Image (spheres, rainbow, N blue to C red):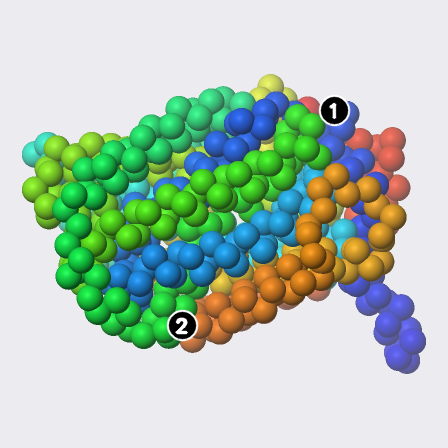
Amino acid sequence: MDVQAFFRKYSIIFETKPIAKLMECTGGAHGLKKVLSPFELTLLGIGAIIGTGIFVITGVVAANYSGPALVVSFIISGIVCAFAALSYAEFAAMVPVAGSAYTYGYASLGEIWAWIIGWDLILEYSVSIAAVAVGWSGYMVNLLTAVGIILPPGLVNPPGTSGGLVNLPAILIILAITALLIIGVKESARVNNVIVLVKIGVILLFLFLAFSHINPANWTPFMPYGWTGVVTGAAIVFFAYIGFDAVSTAAEEVRDPQRNVPIGILSSLVVATVLYIAVSAVLTGIVPYLAFKNTSAPVAFALGQIGISWGSALVSVGAICGITSVLIVLLYGQTRIFFAMSRDGLLPGVFRELHPVYRTPVKVTLLVGLVTALIASLLPLQTIAELVNIGTLAAFIIVSLGVIVLRRTRPDIERPFRCPFVPWVPLLCIISCGILIVMLPFVTHMRFVIWLAIGLVVYFAYSRHHSRLHEDTAGLGCWGTEEGEKGGG
């Protein structure tokens, strides 16, 4: 094969998918229902962002990376996320289609980049769900212990940790949320609304109860691990901010998405960042940072340490509710990414089939639930948290790069929301995310490279040959086969 023939054969992998074609699948009998209001979307974002970051990851990062400078780590991550959120908001308003960064990459950079980021998002969300479920389990065990119910260590810890065999509570909560999502996104949003309001109330109660117990001596030394620890901590707590990415996965199911999705992304990020900074400062002020080394429930633990045992139990209840909302949104986002990739032919068609009554992608929801339950039952929290962040950072880089590219190649496209100061804001996101990736542990880099290598094998062995990029899907309900028509309900 000569060089020209080679490039002709493989040029498809760099082709972009027109936005008009992406939008074809969002209407009609095979599109997802538009049922979410701006208020529900904002609470979805807050529900996903505020949860494990406050109730679980704060203790891990304070003890092992940032110390009292945890607040600085959250500020750094919040600034980086603000750059990314502006890029996401432009894309989400311009291409209100399920799939988030995967879809944006397809529209701006080409199929191979869309596949890479979609494969990356599969890792990001799967591991995020597992980490959140482990945190939920930690708070549930803490609450049950407080009322005198002691669960066997073998059933609440992963293998190799404190005599553990399997994390059973983590499995059960994932399966329960999976069932809820199969019933419908509107029903899931209603449950989320209630528990997000409970969660915010619990966080405000913690701040009120703990503020008077702050001992400034606990903030000394402020940076026990130096700036390297602070920046590494920022890379780890980045895990806490991926919720607004989940908001963008809901774009196809939002009423008036061009207006409401940017509102949901930016407002949820602002609320979350303020609460993260406040909780970080108070948490490390009332308990020495090293005391958090062996707890996956730092907020409840801290209240217990200062003698407010009833507050500790109440926080555990609120944390369980709050972390449940994170699971709802993350599981939801994962299924929509699978759904979008399947609809484009890059994953098997079974993943794009909708339930005939509930109009939800039931088979992929079951798959995601079972796989993430298995991960959560077997892996320790710190390993999970480190692995997910590199996927998040890579997604932000791709989305920011896509904004720059489309501004130059398609300046004519209507942009209901425009990221300010392009290309500088997206470039700042790319650079800062790159720095945070470098600061992650080496073993995390290796796991990520291995995952991407597996993804490229899958792409060239299956996805490239089944891509529906050149299919004329107009008039075929964007499915193109009788089987797809039946699966779509």
Report the residue marked by disc 2: 441
Give the position of the N terminus as an image quadrant.
bottom right
Disc number lying in front (2 or 1): 2
Q: Sort mark 2 into few (<14), some (14-19) or many (20+) by Cα contacts within 10 Å.
A: some
Q: Residue at x 79, y 63 (%)?
A: 14
Q: Which mark is residue 211?
A: none
Decide if residue 291 is on the left or right side of residue 103.
Answer: left
| Nearer-N-terminus badge (2/1) | 1
Tag 2: residue type? Pro
The percent position of residue 189, horizontal first and vertical second, equals: 49, 26
Q: Residue at x 59, y 62 (%)?
A: 429
Find numbered disc 2 in the image and state the secondary structure of the residue it sits on: loop
Q: Is residue 150 above or below residue 430?
A: above
Q: Is residue 400 above or below residue 335?
A: below
Give the position of the C terminus as an image quadrant.
top right
Decide if residue 350 is on the left or right side of residue 180.
Answer: right
Find numbered disc 1 in the image and state the secondary structure of the residue it sits on: helix
Q: Nearer the viewer, residue 426 or 59?
A: 426
Residue 350 appears in the rendering: no
Residue 425 falls in image quadrant: bottom right
Q: Which mark is residue 29?
A: 1
Q: Nearer the viewer, residue 115 or 322?
A: 322
Contact between marks 2 and 1 (CB within 8 A): the answer is: no
The residues bearing labels 2 and 1 have C-alpha atoms spaced at a distance of 46 Å
Q: Residue at x 33, y 28 (%)?
A: 198
Q: Sort mark 1 into few (<14), some (14-19) or many (20+) by Cα contacts within 10 Å.
A: few
Tag 1: residue type? Ala
Decide if residue 127 is on the left or right side of residue 162.
Answer: right
The percent position of residue 364, horizontal first and vertical second, equals: 56, 39
Q: Give the farthest residue toward the bottom.
A: 2
Q: Residue at x 25, y 49 (%)?
A: 282
